[in-house]
Amino acid sequence: MPQVAFTTLGCKVNQFETEVMEGLFKAHGYAVVAFDQQADVYVINTCSVTNLGEKKSRQLIRRASRQNPKAIIAAAGCYSQVSPDQVAQIPGVDVIVGTQDRARIVELVEAAVANNRTVQYNVVADIMHAQEFEDIPLFSMPGRKRAFLKIQEGCTNFCTYCIIPYARGPLRSRPLASIAAETEKLVAAGFNEIVLTGIHLGAFGRDLLHNGTEITLVEAVETVLAAGGQGLMRLRLGSLESIELSDRLISLLQNDKRLCPHLHLPLQSGDDRILRAMNRHYTTAQYRELITNIKAHVPGIAITTDIIVGFPGETDELFESTLAFTATLGFAKIHVFPYSRRTGTPAAEFAEQVPEADKKSRVHRLQQLADQQSKEFYQLFLGKILDVLFDTVEGDGIISGLTGNYARIYATGNQENIGRIAAVTLEKFYQDGLWGQIREYFS
């Protein structure tokens, strides 16, 4: 039986797409092995969000080639899409697939084998001409304890720091019937939690019509909830743009307890001048109003976010504005990123690039605030009972998992408890979360 190994860089969408490709290889009789093992085929699912992501992609391609110089090397994903000619020049690469045509990856690998690696197969096309969601069903189940379900592709926001619209192309949405079918398959396989993912998730449905009516993310959420039935215990949403969070979606969060009380709403900056320079489509006042509204309607909800510091033109004064604004919002978790100058984006050519030392200092200060807000969020749940999906064996008889509102909880347990949901009394702070006492299991 031929063996194939995968490695994935980047986001949860990339992780989902790797699982889809794994299923394609398994359906053709391949065994999936760890990336550090000898394999006949290596697939590197690349990332292009930062220059560092591209560098790591190249390193992993070369590493695979060293591990087995005779193996077929396939490079897929965002880096392959935006820079196929660069990827083609890396020694050992036999197959190049971008962010479409992944359904052909086994066919292309086997063509490379048949031709004794004398032909390089590069099928990367202009992604801006893509019109339909690449709907590849899962042929095998993921090896994780929560399942990602990709329902949307592409982005047309064109934030000035971001390469993703050029890597992923225009908006394409997965048909509702396909979403329902995949949901049924995942629930039947025993997954207690499904996470909806997409490149621009909140734009789901803009390219679809149903009986002349526009479809939105709400319809996708309702489709998953209906198809999952009582077998689906949790549905979590991936990252959303704040201005795309409708009152109907907030109402669903209020009324269906299966929908996790957790929203990831990237802020990126707490200063309106920087938001305009980033080409973000909201103001700080609009963002504050939304957060206030959500917390009023869904008590205990976790709001997590991303913030970039050191964007071109961010002075000390403007950074202080971001710090002061962020301090008023009470995030459960903040992912802090120093601005990375991404070749091929407008912001890379902006004047007033911020020195690395200033970025580092600002990251440190904002991270201190992030840690403080996270602790204050966790403090709210001490002594309470929350449901936890355990997903990790930490060692020494300790397991950990996530509550519906994205709090990391630790408890006594072992591998047998992984993938199960339990009611847990939260007792004290522990590591990056809370320690709890398991009361009973529900699954």
Image: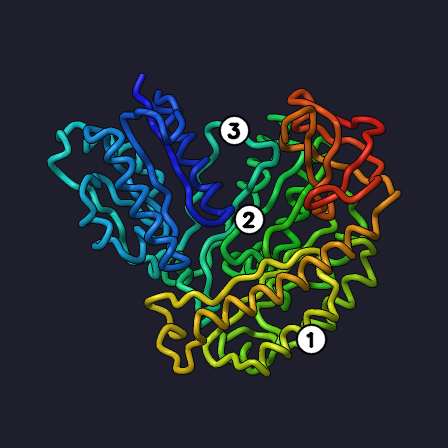
Q: Residues within 10 Å of mark 2 (few under 14, many from 20)?
A: many
Quadrant of the frame with the C terminus: top right
Say if mark 1 contacts mark 2, CB within 8 Å: no
Number of the label disc, if any, that sits on residue 197: 2
In the image, farthest residue toward the right: 383
The quarter of the picture where residue 412 lies is top right
Task: Give the structural element (helix, strand or loop) at label 3.
Answer: loop
Q: Residues within 10 Å of mark 1 (few under 14, many from 20)?
A: some
Q: Position of residue 261 (x, y in %)?
A: 74, 50
Q: Position of residue 175 (x, y in %)?
A: 52, 47
Residue located at (24% from left, 29% from top): 68
Q: Earlier in the sequence, mark 1 or mark 2?
A: 2
From mark 2 to mark 3, how far is it between C-alphas? 17 Å
Residue at the disc numbered 3? 141
Residue located at (16% from left, 27% from top): 114
Q: Earlier in the sequence, mark 2 or mark 3?
A: 3
Q: Residues within 10 Å of mark 3 (few under 14, many from 20)?
A: some
Identify which amino acid the numbered label 1 is placed on: Ala
Is residue 259 visible in the rendered image? The answer is no
Q: Earlier in the sequence, mark 3 or mark 1?
A: 3
Identify which amino acid the numbered label 2 is placed on: Thr
Residue at the disc numbered 1? 324
Say if mark 2 contacts mark 3, CB within 8 Å: no
Image position of 215 (left or right of 118): right
Task: Give the structural element (helix, strand or loop) at label 1.
Answer: helix
The quarter of the picture where residue 283 lies is bottom right
